[in-house]
Amino acid sequence: MIHPFSTFRIYWEFAMLLFTIVALLVTPVFLAFYFDKFEKWYLYNLAIDAVFICDIVIWFFTGYYDSRTQLIVMDPTFAMSKYLRGFFIVDILPVLPLELFIVLFESLWYLASLNLLKILRMRTTIIYLSRLYHVYQINFHLYKIMEIGIIVIMCVHWTACLEYYLPLMVAKIAGQDDALVIEKVYIEICRSWIQSPYMAKRKTRRAIYISCVNRAIISLTGSKHYLNMLAPEDIAYNLILTIFGFLGFVYLLARFSQLTTTFHSTSKRHMKLIQQLYTRYKELSQPLQRQLTAYYQYRNKKGFETDKLIINHVSPYLREKLLLHKYQRLVKNVELFKHLPEVVLTQLIGTVRSEIFMTNDVLITAGTNGDALYFIASGTVAVYNIMGREMCHLEDGAYFGELSLVLEDEPRLVKIVAVENSEVYILSRVDFNRVLVPYPDLLNYLQEVTLVNLEQTPGLEKICEDRDSLLSVSGGVNISGIKAKRKD
């Protein structure tokens, strides 16, 4: 059995998404513009059907997620039964190999029209697009725009091809083979629009297709046609398109209205508060207004409010799990934390706070006493020595100031400034000591481990020269200085 979230399944769905879109584009073109040349395209159609059949077979051997039990069901019997009771019929109808009957019996030419059932594969296209949205965490608005775009393009494309296909079908059924040839004289009696002098000037399939698209859009929007509609099939089809066009317009209006209301809804709320409370009533300067706006834009982009709201409203047990997941890079990267019991580590994670530093904000200043551990969650900071010379940059996953947690009154030998907007996790020594109060022996042990690591840590200059090891040993910013001082 294939796991529904396995790598193979994800790649297969992505490939099938692209293939289905292409198949839905070429199928109506074959039917309409190669109406009497079935032998030129039936092999391509059989190949398309073969791929779709492979997709159906894979569905039989793919597990599914049961939302009721929140479990992945991998039992073949249950998976097959669910698919058979679901959309198996919808998937199998468009891929029946009817072309073989048409090749053997020319009188069954009308079976080719059953290929129009391939439009049912639009359901699979939307499902695959939705699954890719969840797997790759695509932006919600981009996903919705892609979904609406695919639906609109397919609708216009299929209606355009049917504009040309239906008159050919009617003429064929009526036995008017001669009606398939455009005459020089246009008789204004029950003559389809494809037999008009206007269409007689369109010699290529591309020109005919463009005219069909134009006519389909006119029908969908309910506009006035530039060609009179005399044939019953043209009148009926135009009426159907007008109705569906109106319903489609209402659908698009509702979807776009939904999208516009969700665009930056949190940002708009905060911007309104800023304007009301600060920029308007506090009469802030323009530079300060820009800094405040940039701060909230970055804060909203990172989803601070959502994280805070969720974490504050869940159970204590779930809160611990969420915090451990959020700060897992901090736990894995900081060497000091590898010597802590899980119960202590869980308590420490609960005291970590997240802060945003804008460009050119100073994180620490040389000469001051260290009082916290800093971990760069995202962004870049620059390290300057006491003379003001830039020594290196620290990026995502780097940390500094861990000595401040176990050694008091250690002066900082560097200045660190944010190069870009950065999110930094901070653990203060006060919180660290408060958690370790019940474990005095543990604090002594950590101090001994720190002193041992101190002798094995390279100097700051060596760290900054070795950019590849920067993320793993960047905590040596303070350690290297202390090491040099102790040797002196």
Image (cartoon, grey):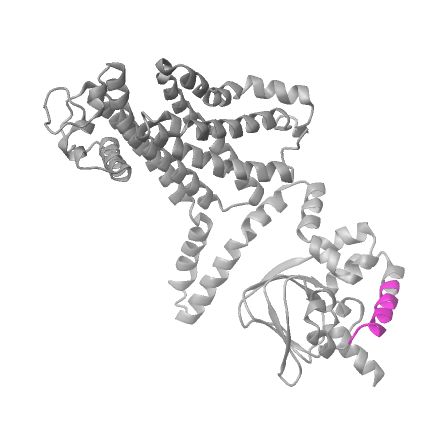
The answer to if 210 sits in the magenta stretch is no
| Residue 314 screen position, x and y as percent | 64, 41
Q: Quadrant of residue 171?
A: top left
Q: Is residue 447 left or right of residue 28?
A: right
Q: Dividing the image into 4 quarters, which one contains the N terminus?
A: top right
| Residue 455 screen position, x and y as percent | 85, 74
Q: Main secondary structure of the magenta part?
A: helix
Q: How many marks?
A: 0
Residue at (68%, 57%) from the top-left corner?
352
| Residue 65 screen position, x and y as percent | 62, 29
Is residue 170 placed above or below 454 in the rendered structure? above
Residue at (62%, 25%) from the top-left corner?
68
Q: From where the camera sits, is residue 152 visible?
A: yes
Is residue 398 placed above or below 134 in the rendered structure? below
Q: Viewer-proximal residue, 314 or 116?
A: 116
Q: Is residue 14 left or right of residue 320?
A: left
Q: Quadrant of residue 470?
A: bottom right
Question: What segment is highlighted magenta in the picture?
Answer: 445-458
Q: Quadrant of residue 273?
A: bottom left
Residue at (63%, 28%) from the top-left corner?
62
Q: Is residue 197 left or right of residue 130?
A: left
Q: Is residue 346 left or right of residue 103?
A: right
Q: Viewer-proximal residue, 433 or 15?
A: 15
Q: Dividing the image into 4 quarters, which one contains the C terminus?
A: bottom right
Residue at (51%, 32%) from the top-left corner?
127
| Residue 362 screen position, x and y as percent | 59, 73
Q: From where the camera sits, is residue 285 visible?
A: no
Q: Viewer-proximal residue, 409 or 468?
A: 468
